[in-house]
Amino acid sequence: MLRWTKRLLVGRPLRNERLGQTLLPKRLALPVFCSDPLSSNAYATEEILRALSLGGLALFFLAPWVALAVIVLLAVVVASYRQTCHAYPNGGGAYAVSRANLGRNAALVAASALLVDYVLTVAVSVAAGVDAITSAFLTLRPLSVLLSLGFVALLALLNLRGVKESGTIFAIPTYGFVAVVFAMIGWGVVRIVTGDRPVAESASFGIGEAQHVAGAALLLLALRAFAQGCTALTGVEAVSNGVPHFKKPKSRNAAGTLAIMGGATIAMFAGITMLALVSKVRIADDPSRLVGAPAGYQQRTAIAQVAGAVFGYRSILFLLVQGFTAAILILAANTAFNGFPILASILGSDGYLPRQFARRGDRLVFSNGIIILAVLAGALIWTFHASTSRLIQLYIIGVFVSFTLSQAGMVRHWTGALATGPDRARRRRINRARLINGLGAVFTGVVLVVVLVTKFVHGAYLVVIAMPALFLLMKSIERHYRRVARELAPEPGGMVLPARIHAVVLVSRLHKPTLQALAYARATRPDTLTAVTVASSPAETRALQAEWAERGIPVPLAELDAPYRDITGPVVDYIAGLRRDHPRDLVVVYLPEYVVGHWWETVLHNQSALRLKARLLFQRGVMVTNVPWQLASSRAAV
């Protein structure tokens, strides 16, 4: 039953020969690798306005300057990662760059940041996608958590089936989103120029101050708005990770794709922010602070209010904006479903995560990583009630940790390249690349400090705890694997042969499984062979002795006393006694057991053999051999 269900959901296993790599042109690589940063335009502007709303409408004048700072930072980061694409044509993620240039500890810090960030990417993107849906259909808002969990489960199932990053699947929502957003910006500009300025549904509302801000408090609030607006930078690293998937020339095509993405993201972010301010979109972290809002007012997202103001809420174009926004956000979450399992597999191969993460499943995907990512993201969505505004407080810390380490690693990389004595032209190119990466490291490092300071008390402390905990966990896993490898390393002289072998067959009653175990044990020709039964019931023990003698079985039957009716303890003590009497000998315990075909049959039979086997595994010099007897139901289940 379980196997049939698995095949229905996941599909048939694939042969190793089906594992291949499809090279992508730029037009398809853009939607595959850039859906995350492009989709962040759906909530980056909103997060800036939400933060500034804490000081009331009076602080909205800061929004253009905050947006400009985010744009400058985005341009610097894009330029920095273009250098990474050229330097690492085999993939230059933060883990790989840090490991090559900064050492193992820095690489593990980057890995812990990326793993946490991937989980948050799924939670934030799916929650934001559901926000886009419920902003178009307000009656669905009470179902936000269930819808979000459903989308996470759907993405996990699709990835477990091995659905690859098809350019066509990604291209439709990505290019559709870009097209409708630019159409919205263009039509909005036309209306402004012609004197028909769009007006948001919340334009007449005021916003009550959550706190009085002035002086240092005003600066901190502006920095917090900047930190939340930096969500526009999430996913920029994906292109540098995916350089091997580009068509030749790989590095140049990847760098070109990154430049196109940066230009499109900057234009969309600037346009949405401009329209939100012109149409007087009002966003508050708590809708109850919206002064003049009608009772029961449900706050739509900023991009939904802009689209409604430009196109009208009943127009097909408004629904298209919301539909493509939801689609690209959910597909952006799928980027993490590709990145997390691959990074986890690399860490598993390096011994920093359980080795199970490095193994591919039936469909040639890293199934364990996919399942863990879905469970963790689902738990976050459930805990934070699918609230984008609450989840986003945890976001981007990991992003900027990996940004900073990656760019610092690139500075070290270029410095090493200069030491090889290149010619003058190449030296100029290397110095220019080092300068760009150096600026990127400084900028992202400063922003990391800003993000930590401004978001720490608003939930980011959870990430600050999670990342070091994950780092220490990976270090301890690696120590464990090294210790096990030392213990298991063969010695020069090989293994010493046991002096004698003592065979013990456990007997509960005299039936076919017992007779088969006795026959198998005799066939191995041990030095001694003893059958052992636990005398938990005097009547049953006497009946067993009589049948044993009647059949004339040529194996002595030993009885173990069990005054407390425990079976496992007396057997373990008996085996331990054999080991004490014969420390250089080997004891082989034969466990006869029958195999059933249905799960409900397992409940009807006690699991004494399983418990006993678990205890004997910890006895040195003891081997446990299972002798199965398949019942008719098990043969039918094959």
Image (cartoon, rainbow, N blue to C red):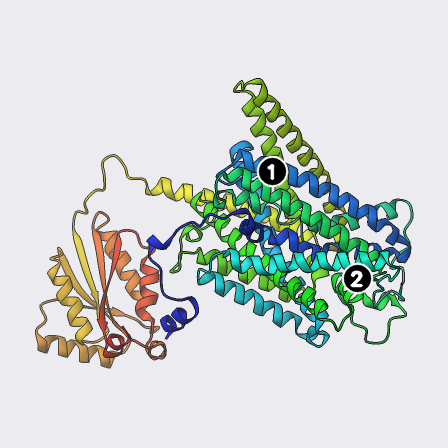
Q: Is residue 180 above or below residue 70?
A: below
* Res. 545 image quadrant: bottom left
Residues 478 and 181: in front is 181
Say how many tags the image has: 2
Q: Amino acid at mark 1?
A: Arg
Q: Position of residue 499 (x, y in %)?
A: 17, 47
Tell me the mark number nearer the camera, choosing from 1 and 2.
1
Q: Position of residue 528 (x, y in %)?
A: 14, 58
Q: Quadrant of the C terminus?
A: bottom left
At horizontal 87% and vertical 71% (from top left) the residue drawn is: 293
Structural distance between the alpha carbons of marks 1 and 2: 36 Å
Q: Position of residue 469 (x, y in %)?
A: 58, 48
Q: Is residue 615 left or right of residue 522?
A: right
Q: Position of residue 485 (x, y in %)?
A: 37, 42
Element on which disc 1 rests: helix
Which residue is labeled 2 in the image?
285
Rate crowding at label 1 as few (under 14), some (14 to 19) or many (20 or more) other CA atoms within 10 Å. many
Q: Quadrant of the N terminus?
A: bottom left
Which residue is labeled 1 in the image?
82
* Res. 179 image quadrant: bottom right
Residues 88 and 637: in front is 88
Residues 489 and 50: in front is 50
Labels 1 and 2: the sequence-earlier one: 1
Q: Is residue 306 above or below residue 355?
A: below
* Residue 17 appears anywhere in the view: yes
* Residue 456 appears anywhere in the view: no
At horizontal 51% and vertical 34% (from top left) the residue drawn is: 100
Q: Amino acid at mark 2?
A: Asp
Rate crowding at label 2 as few (under 14), some (14 to 19) or many (20 or more) other CA atoms within 10 Å. some
At horizontal 59% and vertical 68% (from top left) the residue drawn is: 149
